[in-house]
Amino acid sequence: MIDRQKLIGWALVIVSSAFLAYFLKTRLLAPGPALEKKEWLQFIVSIGIFMLGTANVRLAAMRARKRD
């Protein structure tokens, strides 16, 4: 049986880390126009989603340990 909470957690971690890597590589470290408030907000929200996904994975692991 696939643990849906763990699967969703990993999906959140992977998507948000991919966005963070893209943002850091193409927008923050590369020369170009100044960053707008919208882009900073997306960056902060992506960090929050990464943290939420990590918590999801950890909580799923704790729940699995309690079942055993």
Image: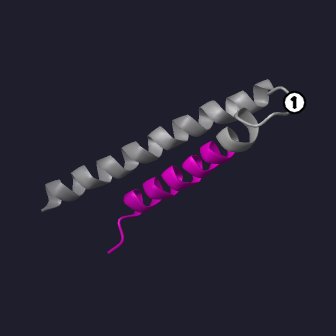
The quadrant holding residue 20 is top right
Q: Indicate the colouring scheme.
A: one colour
Q: Residue at x 26, y 54 (%)?
A: 61
* Viewport quadrant of the N terminus: bottom left
Q: Is residue 21 magenta?
A: yes
Q: Residue at x 67, y 47 (%)?
A: 22
| Pick the front one: 68 or 45 | 45
| Pick the front one: 12 or 20 | 20
Give the answer, above or below, for where 28 lies relative to 6: above
Give the answer, above or below, for where 37 lies relative to 68: above
Q: Main secondary structure of the magenta part?
A: helix
Q: Where does residue 47 sit, x and y in percent of width and height?
A: 55, 36
Q: Residue at x 38, y 43 (%)?
A: 55
Question: Are there few (<14), some (14-19), or many (20+) residues within 10 Å of tag 1?
Answer: few
**Count of marks overlaid on the render:** 1
Q: Amino acid at mark 1?
A: Pro
Mark 1 highlights which residue? Answer: 33
Residue that protrudes farthest toward the bottom in the picture = 1
* Viewport quadrant of the C terminus: bottom left
Q: Where does residue 17 sit, x and y in percent of width and height?
A: 55, 48
Q: Where does residue 15 sit, x and y in percent of width and height?
A: 58, 53
Start and end of the magenta stretch?
1-22
As drawn, is 30 to the left or to the right of 8?
A: right
As drawn, is 49 to the left or to the right of 66?
A: right
Residue that protrudes farthest toward the left in the picture = 68
Q: Is residue 16 magenta?
A: yes
Q: Residue at x 46, y 39 (%)?
A: 51
Give the answer, above or below, for where 63 lies relative to 47: below
Q: Where does residue 19 sit, x and y in percent of width and height?
A: 64, 47
SS type, badge 1: loop
